[in-house]
């Protein structure tokens, strides 16, 4: 099973920063999830929120300032996507696109290709953004983010052509996993932070779990693997 570090290792270092990604990889992440928005000059940068206020204390909206201004306001704390991809090179990278804007999706895809990272990157986020990813890259690997108990619409699945169905963790049941796998999809779950939730998802047979507590998830996976008969423990 794949252990995905949500925004890096946010209990150790500030989320969506290079230090957070380094910590997550050191703690055993198989993949790092990061959020991308575009600046006023079209540069994809790594931040979840529309403004800099929560993490960096500035009221500025990311989309209304240049990448240079973002760097100035955050002391270089908000990396560009290109910088983040260089740091996460040892593992897979899940690019989450929290806003619908096609221009952001296209900028992210262009950066991925420009840095030669397409073989280790996959995408999640707003369905509108994922449509733009698919339009920009016919071969992109997509994890369709889903927040409802109902199954994604057949028309959306046909348009996005995801490899993964990426569910809010509380929605996942054994039936969810079995039916998805029968249709050729992998199942991912986000964002599980309690050990109880992690163990439940592992037991259900999901392929990936996203967490803010990557070291705890790694321990749960290692414990599970050690308990398999015939495995050295």
Image (cartoon, rainbow, N blue to C red):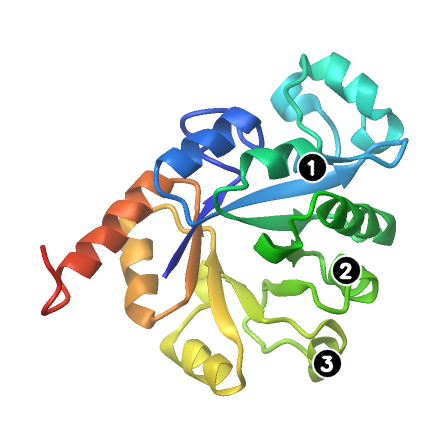
Q: Name the residue under label 2.
A: 133
Q: What element carries label 1?
A: helix
Q: Is residue 65 visible?
A: yes
Q: Which residue is drawn at 71% across and 68% down?
A: 139
Percent across and percent down for residue 232 are 10, 58
Q: As rendered, which of 128 and 46 lies closer to the eye? A: 46
Q: In which quarter of the image is the C terminus?
A: bottom left
Q: In this view, does 195 lie to the left or right of 16?
A: left
- Looking at this view, name the residue that lies furthest to the bottom: 182
Question: What residue would you read off at disc 3?
Answer: 158
Closer to viewer: mark 3 or mark 2: 2
Alpha-carbon span between mark 1 and mark 3: 28 Å
Residue sitting at x 75%, y 39%: 37
Q: Is residue 39 left or right of residue 58?
A: right
Does the rendering let one see residue 10?
no
For marks 1 and 3, the one nearer the N-term is 1
Rounded to the nearest angstrom, the CA distance separating label 1 from label 2 is: 15 Å
Where residue 231 sits in the image (x, y, percent)?
Answer: 13, 63
Residue at point 70%, 36% (across, down)? 82
In this figure, which residue is indicated by the disc labeled 1?
A: 81
**Label 2 packing within 10 angstroms: few (<14), some (14-19), many (20+):** many
């Amino acid at each position: 099973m794949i252990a995905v570090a949500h925004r890096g290792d946010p209990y150790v270092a500030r989320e969506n920063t290079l230090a957070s990604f380094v910590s997550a990889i050191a703690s055993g992440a198989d993949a790092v999830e990061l959020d991308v928005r575009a600046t006023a000059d079209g540069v994809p940068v790594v931040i979840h929120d529309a403004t800099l206020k929560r993490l960096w204390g500035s009221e500025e909206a990311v989309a209304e300032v240049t990448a240079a201004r973002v760097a100035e306001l955050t002391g270089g704390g908000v990396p560009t996507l290109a910088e983040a991809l260089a740091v996460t090179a040892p593992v897979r990278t899940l690019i989450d696109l929290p806003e619908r804007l096609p221009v952001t999706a296209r900028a992210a895809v262009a950066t991925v290709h420009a840095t030669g990272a397409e073989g280790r990157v996959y995408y999640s986020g707003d369905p509108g953004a994922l449509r733009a990813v698919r339009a920009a890259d016919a071969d992109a690997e997509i994890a369709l983010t889903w927040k409802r108990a109902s199954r994604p619409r057949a028309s959306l699945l046909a348009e996005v052509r995801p490899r993964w169905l990426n569910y809010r963790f509380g929605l996942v049941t054994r039936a969810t996993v079995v039916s998805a796998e029968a249709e050729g999809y992998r199942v991912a779950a986000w964002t599980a932070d309690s050990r109880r939730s992690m163990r439940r998802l592992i037991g259900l047979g999901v392929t990936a779990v996203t967490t803010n507590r990557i070291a705890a998830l790694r321990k749960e996976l290692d414990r599970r693997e050690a308990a398999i008969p015939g495995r050295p423990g």
